[in-house]
Image (cartoon, rainbow, N blue to C red):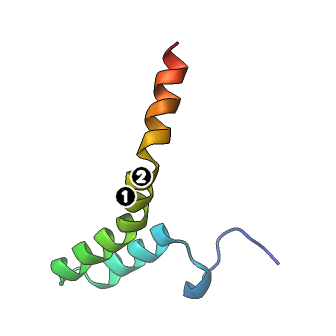
Amino acid sequence: MSFGCDARRSRATVAPSVASFFAGNTSNPPAATAASLFAMLPVVIAYLFLQKYFVQGLVGAQK
């Protein structure tokens, strides 16, 4: 079993899923924009909760 590029949508990561959504929905920009925003949402939420640790890591790296 290969863990590289998997053509099945159920095993695709977010980036290929959004790319395939853009390819199929070029005539619907609002839906494509919504797909991109939903893909970014978990990363933004994680950053907001872990921002303190990101800043501590950056400040600690400068010393």
Q: Residue at x 31, y 70 (%)?
A: 36
Q: Tag 2: Cα neighbours inside 10 Å, few (<14), some, or many (≥20)?
A: few
Up the image or down, 43 lies above or below 30; here it is above
Q: Is residue 8 visible?
A: no
**Residue 45 x %, y %:** 39, 61
Q: Residue at x 78, y 73 (%)?
A: 2
As rendered, which of 46 and 27 lies closer to the eye?
46
Up the image or down, 56 lies above or below 52; here it is above
Judging from the image, what secondary structure is the residue with disc 2 in?
helix
Total number of numbered discs in the rendering = 2
**Residue 15 x %, y %:** 46, 67
**Residue 35 x %, y %:** 31, 76
Q: Write down the residue under mark 1.
A: 44
Residue farthest toward the right in the current orientation of the protein: 1
Left or right: residue 16 versus residue 23 is right
Q: Write down the residue under mark 2.
A: 47
Which image quarter holds the N terminus? bottom right
Give the spatial CA distance, label 1 vs label 2.
Answer: 5 Å
> At label 1, which amino acid type do we have?
Val
Judging from the image, what secondary structure is the residue with disc 1 in?
helix
> At label 2, which amino acid type do we have?
Tyr
**Residue 62 x %, y %:** 49, 16
